[in-house]
Each structure stands twice: as C-alpha cells, then as structure tokens.
Amino acid sequence: MSNLLNNPHVLEKARAELDKLVGQEKLVEEADVAKLPYLQSIISETLRLYPAAPLLVPHSASEICSIEGYEIPKDAIVMVNAWAIQRDPNLWDDALSFKPERFEEGKEMSDQIYKLMPFGLGRRACPGMVLAQHVLGLTLGALIQCFEWERVSEKKIDMTEGQGLTMPKVQPLEAMCKASQLGKKLLCF
C-alpha cells in the first residue's frame, strides 16, 4: 500500500482495472484475481523490491560445484540473497524504482523467473506461494475497491527498511482512507 500511496497514478490504474474487469457492484473474488494483470504486476513489483524475507531458505550443496567461477564445496551451506538479486542494476532497468509495468504482459518475461524469486525457485520454492499470491491479490484488490486512499501529508512515505528476518519498514504506514461507494455498500455505512 505504501508504494501505491507514493505512486498515485499506479493506484488509479489499478482502480480502473478493477472497475473495468470486476465492476463497481461486487467485491473482487478469487476467480477475478487471475484476470487482473496490472494488480498482479503491482504485487510482483512489490515483492521484487520488498521480499517477505531477504534471504531464501539455506541449502546444503550435495556435491562440489562451480557457479560463475566460484567453487562451492560439498556440504557447504548456500544462502541466496533474493533482496540483492531483485535490486541488482545489472539485472533490472532502474532497479530501485517502483515500476509495475515491467511485469505487464507482452514484455520479455523468459529471464525474469531467475531474477524474481521472493518465494524461492524450483522444487524447494515456498509451498504456500500460490496461496500467498491469491491472498495478496484478494486483499489488495479489496482495499483498492472499498477505500479511497491518500497519504497523511504531501511528503512521500518513507520506505526505509529495518533490520530483522523480514526487514519491516522502519516507520509504520500511516494513511488516510474513506469508504468508496462500494465500500459503503459492503460495509453498511
């Protein structure tokens, strides 16, 4: 939500997509989420910049191997820094900017599977990945549909990350919201 408040044009584009594809008479449903590519792009871009955990689950090398000239000994603990990979300017154009459009359909996606890994990759990827993406889509979609959002001041929201396993924002989000027409209808205002 912080990224959307700092980029109101993205929030409005997401609202327009929801209005067009879901309508203003019903709340976004699970079946709708897959039909909302811009909302999915927002989620992908948010997870790229702010993965739930910066380091993926550690693994042990089952045999000696070489990666990009680095020799990994057998039984070495290997940790992938997804946070660094997903912000690497050698891999991403304008790497530190919030640009959901980089994930829109029609863009070259073949190499992104190895650059975007907030849930890990392959057979050891997070088993809850699909559920998490659906819940994120439903939640964010409902928040956009039911409320009109604004920052509490003209100043952009501070996106500085704290320390810890999940790197939460240093400053908690403070935002103003008021119920939209659909929100009033659904929330009985």
Image (tube, rainbow, N blue to C red):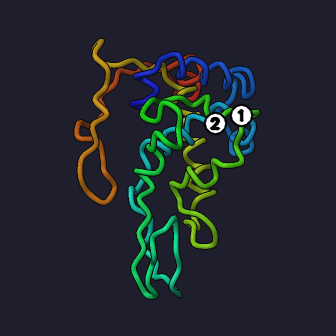
Judge by depth and name the residue closer to the eye, 132 or 87: 87
Q: Going by the picture, which residue comes out furthest to the front?
A: 69
Horizontal arrangement in the rendering, residue 71 relative to residue 136 (left or right): left
Q: How far separated are the C-alphas under marks 1 and 2?
A: 7 Å
For marks 1 and 2, give the one nearer the viewer: 1
The residue drawn where x is 40% and y is 50% is: 84
Residue 141 vs 163, above or below: the answer is above
Report x, y in % for residue 42.
Answer: 56, 34
Please provide percent x and percent y for residue 114.
60, 55
Q: Quadrant of residue 40?
A: top right
The residue located at (74%, 44%) in the rendering is 31
Element on which disc 2 rests: helix
Q: Are marks 1 and 2 in contact (CB under 8 Å)?
A: yes
Residue that mark 2 sits on: 103
Taking 148 as reference, is 44 left or right? right
Q: Residue at x 60, y 24 (%)?
A: 14
Q: Residue at 64%, 53% (x, y): give it.
A: 113
Asked which secondary structure carries label 1, the reply is: loop
Rate crowding at label 2 as few (under 14), some (14 to 19) or many (20 or more) other CA atoms within 10 Å.
some
Q: In the image, 160: left or right of 181? A: left
On residue 107, the disc is 1
The residue type indicated by label 2 comes to: Phe
The one of 141 and 71 positioned closer to us in this rendering? 71
Q: In the rendered view, tell whether residue 130 sits above or below residue 181.
A: below
| Quadrant location, the N terminus | top left
Q: Nearer the viewer, residue 84 or 8?
A: 84
**Residue type marked 1:** Lys
Comparing 103 with 7, the one in front is 103
**Is 82 left or right of 176, judged from the image as shown?**
right
| Rendered location of residue 186, percent (x, y) | 57, 29
Residue 45: give x, y in percent of width and height.
53, 38
